[in-house]
Image (tube, helix red, strand yellow):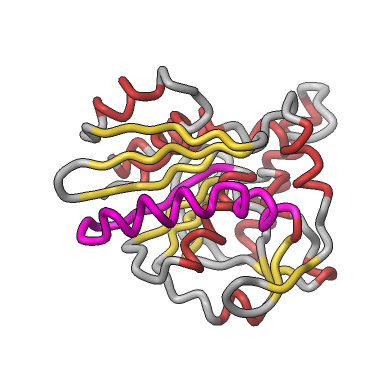
Amino acid sequence: MSVNKFAKMAQLAYLDKEAKAGFKELGFTFHKLIDIDGAQCHLVRNKDTMAVCFRGTEPSEISDVLADLKAWPTKSETDGWVHTGFKDELDKLWDTVLEYVTKYEKLDLYVCGHSLGAAMATLCASRLPQTKHLYTFGSPRVGTCSFVKNLSVPHTRCVNNNDIVTGVPLILMGYKHHGELVYINYYGNIRKMTFWQRFKDGWRGRLQAFSKGMPFDGAYDHSMVYYVRYTEEDA
């Protein structure tokens, strides 16, 4: 499946029951929204495939804000250590997700999400090694080196230029990224770039933001709208 399809699914995760029509357009005949104590995900499936789509941070949801702030590491359910707030949010939904996945275990499983939802998706996939593919957009770092090393699920991790969320929590705190990087440059094109090429491209975005009177473009680049738009070439 294409990256763009899962970008659309991660965007739909921000909706409530009205997301059903959007998932149906993408080929999913079953839809269920799970909302427990401020944590949300959508469970969708068709005759061949099921997916778990996690909702990201909503500034109006105090539980989301608190989850992002609880950045100290805690022991993972699998290997290594992970972000406490992200784990807490997944744990709210875990029993329901596990019941769903177990019930339809013969279907191919995909997991996706954006922002906080991307972090929850990564933790979910780590607990479900049968996951066929994990797609994340604007994901923060989720776990320590041992967590990342032992997570073997195929993972496409999309980063749009200076997306501020992808830079936290800090590497100095022991956190690392997982997955195959799909980098979207300043011009909105998916490109394979070296570290120094990405560094230069990042400054291109920052300088353009400064010229428009913006202090930084990191929040702008985090928008799910641009992840959907810029992955269309992969549709």
Q: Residue at x 43, y 57 (%)?
A: 98
Frontmost residue, 152 versus 162 = 152
The dominant secondary structure in magenta is helix
User: Residue 230: horizontal and vertical position, in percent?
Assistant: 44, 36
Q: Residue at x 53, y 54 (%)?
A: 94
149 relative position to 67: left or right: left
Frontmost residue, 168 versus 127 = 127
Q: Residue at x 58, y 40 (%)?
A: 186
Going by the picture, which residue comes out furthest to the left? Answer: 47
User: Residue 146: horizontal and vertical position, in percent?
Assistant: 64, 82
Range covered by the magenta-colored residues? 85-114
Q: Residue at x 70, y 67 (%)?
A: 82
Q: Quadrant of residue 133?
A: bottom left
Q: Quadrant of the C terminus?
A: top left
Can residue 107 be found in the magenta stretch? yes
User: Residue 123: horizontal and vertical position, in percent?
Assistant: 56, 61
Q: Quadrant of residue 9?
A: top left
User: Residue 30: horizontal and vertical position, in percent?
Assistant: 26, 34
122 relative position to 152: left or right: right
Can residue 88 be found in the magenta stretch? yes
